[in-house]
């Protein structure tokens, strides 16, 4: 797995992962809004074999709730419902892992 992030408006990010280093699954995009500690908005190009197959726009908001933070995430722009359903399990699994890591800090 490879990952890089330039967290600023206009900055890019990239993640390459998968079962084969020869043909990784790649996601990359550009940060459109970086408004700490409230919101981050960025694009996500989903690529296979080096070709973008579609792009979504992700909005993440952070809301203080006492000594906790509510994280809300919207991933919009999937080309059709079938592809959106294929990705439905990804974000909940990622956010559950994120919550476990943050809880240990």
Image: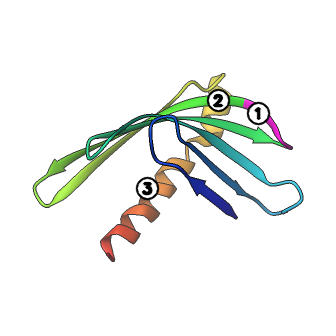
The residue that disc 3 covers is 95
Question: Relative to 7, does residue 39 appear above or below in the rendering?
Answer: above
Q: Who comes first in sequence, dot 2 or dot 3?
A: 2
> At which x and y percent is residue 4?
60, 56
In reply to whether residue 38 is colored magenta, the answer given is no
Q: Are discs 1 and 2 less than 8 Å apart at CB?
A: yes
Q: What span is in magenta?
A: 49-53
Return the residue nearer the eye: 33 or 44: 33
Question: Relative to 88, does residue 25 appear above or below in the rendering?
Answer: below
Name the residue located 76 percent from the left edge and 59 percent from the top edge: 18
Name the residue located 73 percent from the left edge and 48 percent from the top edge: 26
Q: Are discs 1 and 3 less than 8 Å apart at CB?
A: no
The residue that disc 1 covers is 52
Horizontal side of 74 relative to 69 (left or right) equals right
Q: Secondary structure at mark 3?
A: helix
In reply to whether residue 50 is colored magenta, the answer given is yes
The residue that disc 2 covers is 55
Real-space CA distance between mark 2 and mark 3, rounded to the nearest whole angstrom = 21 Å
Instruction: Say which quadrant the N terminus sits in.
Output: bottom right
How many residues crowd mark 1 within 10 Å: few (<14), some (14–19), many (20+)?
Answer: some
Quadrant in which residue 27 is drawn: top right
Mark 2, mark 3: which one is toward the viewer? 2
Q: Who comes first in sequence, dot 1 or dot 3?
A: 1
Return the residue nearer the eye: 67 or 29: 29
Instruction: Say which quadrant the C terminus sits in.
Output: bottom left
> At which x and y percent is residue 102?
34, 68
Horizontal side of 76 relative to 20 (left or right) equals left
Q: Residue furthest bottom?
A: 104
């Amino acid at each position: 797995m490879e990952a890089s992030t330039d967290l600023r408006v206009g900055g890019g990010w990239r993640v390459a992962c998968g079962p084969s280093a020869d043909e990784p699954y790649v996601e990359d995009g550009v940060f459109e809004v970086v408004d700490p500690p409230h919101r981050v908005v960025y694009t996500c190009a989903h690529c296979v074999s080096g070709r973008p197959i579609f792009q979504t726009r992700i909005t993440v908001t952070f809301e203080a709730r006492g000594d906790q933070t509510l994280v809300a995430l919207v991933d919009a722009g999937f080309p059709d419902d079938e592809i959106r359903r294929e990705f439905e399990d990804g974000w909940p699994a990622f956010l559950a892992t994120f919550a476990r890591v943050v809880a240990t800090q």
